[in-house]
């Protein structure tokens, strides 16, 4: 946190800078630059050794048109130690529309990139599934069928209608799931319906298959 200063710009913008620094700290520094002298006015959570009074190295700002955008970024910056930053800069104008100060927020991307890499490592298998261990596991087939239908149609289990459930049961039957003893209770639990609902739908499927076979028989 900067020392007390009589500069009215620091007094005016200090609460905003401090709030941003508290929210994003310790992963972000907030810097208030003097747009007229190109020096640092104040700095919160400094990531380098620079301090108030040091050169800002922002370049000339008095050439900015009053109608130019006042917020720039996020853009990438690099620290000498190799850390990558995402930065945003905002030009703060005075009552006459002239640049008075520049507020910069520099966010250290390292912790975010490490977290993203960690989550990505857990998000997907790193080796193929050992099929010999699962080829007889009918619950795996059941979950593949039901989960695949839900993902393909973008509807949660609670929103599956009768035709959806018939389609799922038909696929489960083709996968041989119902050839396993006590498959119905497991399917009912997976679909979040009652056993009686599954039995009723299976009866409808059987009747449907009978009609199809009857219509296919030669007359």
Image (cartoon, rainbow, N blue to C red):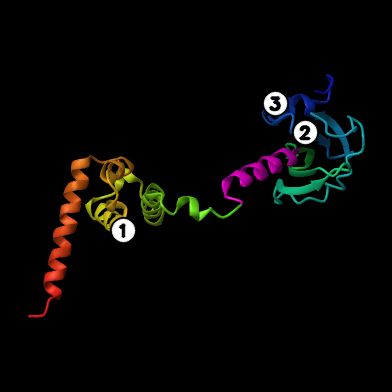
Please, which residue is most extreme toward the left here?
219
> In the displayed structure, would residue 84 be above or below residue 214?
above
Q: Which of marks 2 and 3 is nearer the N terminus?
A: 3
Q: Distance between the residues labelled 2 and 3?
A: 10 Å
Query: Residue placed at 27% from the left, 41% from the top?
Result: 185
User: Which callout, 2 or 1, points to the residue nearer the camera?
Assistant: 1
Query: Residue placed at 77% from the left, 33% from the top?
Result: 29
Q: Earlier in the sequence, mark 2 or mark 1?
A: 2
Q: What residue is shown with label 1?
A: 171
Q: What residue is shown with label 3?
A: 22
**What segment carries the magenta color?**
105-126
User: Which callout, 3 or 1, points to the residue nearer the camera?
Assistant: 1
Q: Main secondary structure of the magenta part?
A: helix
Q: Earlier in the sequence, mark 3 or mark 1?
A: 3
Q: What residue is shown with label 2?
A: 29
Q: Which of 173 and 168 is in front in this view?
A: 173
| Left or right for 147, reference 2 | left
| Left or right for 189, reference 204 | right
- Asked which secondary structure carries label 3, the reply is helix
């Amino acid at each position: 946190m900067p020392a007390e200063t009589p500069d009215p710009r620091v007094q005016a913008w200090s609460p905003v800078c401090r709030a941003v620094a508290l929210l994003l700290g310790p992963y972000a520094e907030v810097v208030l630059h003097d747009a007229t002298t190109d020096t640092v006015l104040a700095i919160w959570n400094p990531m380098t050794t620079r301090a108030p009074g040091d050169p800002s190295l922002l370049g000339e700002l008095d050439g900015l048109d009053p109608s130019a955008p006042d917020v720039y970024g996020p853009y990438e910056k690099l620290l000498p130690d190799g850390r990558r930053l995402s930065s945003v800069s905002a030009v703060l104008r005075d009552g006459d529309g002239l640049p008075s100060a520049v507020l910069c927020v520099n966010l250290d991307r390292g912790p975010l990139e490490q977290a993203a890499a960690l989550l990505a490592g857990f998000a997907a298998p790193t080796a193929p599934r050992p099929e010999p261990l699962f080829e007889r596991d009918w619950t795996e087939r059941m979950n593949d069928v039901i989960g695949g239908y839900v993902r393909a149609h973008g509807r949660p289990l609670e929103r599956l209608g009768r035709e959806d459930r018939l389609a799922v049961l038909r696929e489960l039957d083709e996968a041989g799931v119902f050839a396993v003893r006590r498959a119905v209770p497991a399917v009912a639990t997976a679909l979040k319906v009652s056993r009686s609902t599954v039995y009723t739908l299976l009866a409808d499927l059987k009747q449907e298959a009978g009609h199809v076979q009857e219509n296919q028989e030669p007359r």
